[in-house]
Amino acid sequence: MIVEARTYVLHPGQVPRFMSLMAEGGIDIEKRHLGNLLGFYSTEFGSINKVLHLWAYASHDDRTRRRQNLNADPQWQAFVPTVLPLIRDMNNEILVPAPFSPPIAWASGADVDGMGSTSTDVRT
């Protein structure tokens, strides 16, 4: 299991517009292909004008396949030009969880531990 952290530094004042465009349709296209959205955030303090989103994948191959499918989607190809001018810089990191990292709840409802195996959530 890996987590992709995508960080975008937007031009000043563009976070609300970016978030609005994503909410109006961009995120639905991404979720349809990428699947396991862990979170979508913007910064309030520190380094501002940043948007960060985290995606979980079963493996590097899973990520590659899902990203290729997203990039081939005509709806995504039409959407990207609406947000691209708002972005000043992009950074992409692949995070590999430690064996003791807490489980991640996948879109399927199953929890996946840091080593990629499913576990049962026993919280009540």
Image (tube, rainbow, N blue to C red):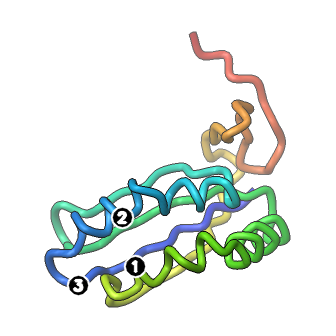
Cβ–Cβ under 8 Å for marks 2 and 1: yes
Q: Earlier in the sequence, mark 2 or mark 3?
A: 3
Q: Tell me how far mark 2 sits from mark 3, CA to CA.
A: 15 Å
User: For the N terminus, which image quadrant?
Assistant: bottom right
State if disc 1 and disc 3 touch (CB < 8 Å).
no
Q: Nearer the viewer, mark 3 or mark 1?
A: 1
The mark lying in front, picked from 2 and 3, is 2
Say which element carries label 2. helix
Rounded to the nearest angstrom, the CA distance separating label 3 from label 1 is: 14 Å
Residue at horizontal 73 percent and vertical 42 percent from the top:
113
SS at circle 3:
loop
The residue wearing badge 1 is: 82
Q: Is residue 47 left or right of residue 40?
A: left
Mark 2 or mark 1: whose residue is earlier in sequence: 2
Image quadrant in which you'd find residue 122: top right
Q: Image point 71% across, 49% down: which residue?
A: 114
**Is residue 122 depicted above or below 49 in this figure?**
above
Q: Please give the name of the residue rendered at 68% of the width and 22% of the height, measured from the top-left corner.
A: 121
For disc 2, the neighbor class at 10 Å (few under 14, some 14 to 19, many from 20) is some
Q: Is 115 or 47 nearer to us in this picture? A: 47
Return the mark for residue 21.
2
Residue 68, image x, y percentages = 76, 76
Residue 106 position within the rendered picture, expressed as x and y whole percent measured from the top left: 68, 41
Q: Secondary structure at mark 1?
A: helix
Residue that label 3 marks = 11
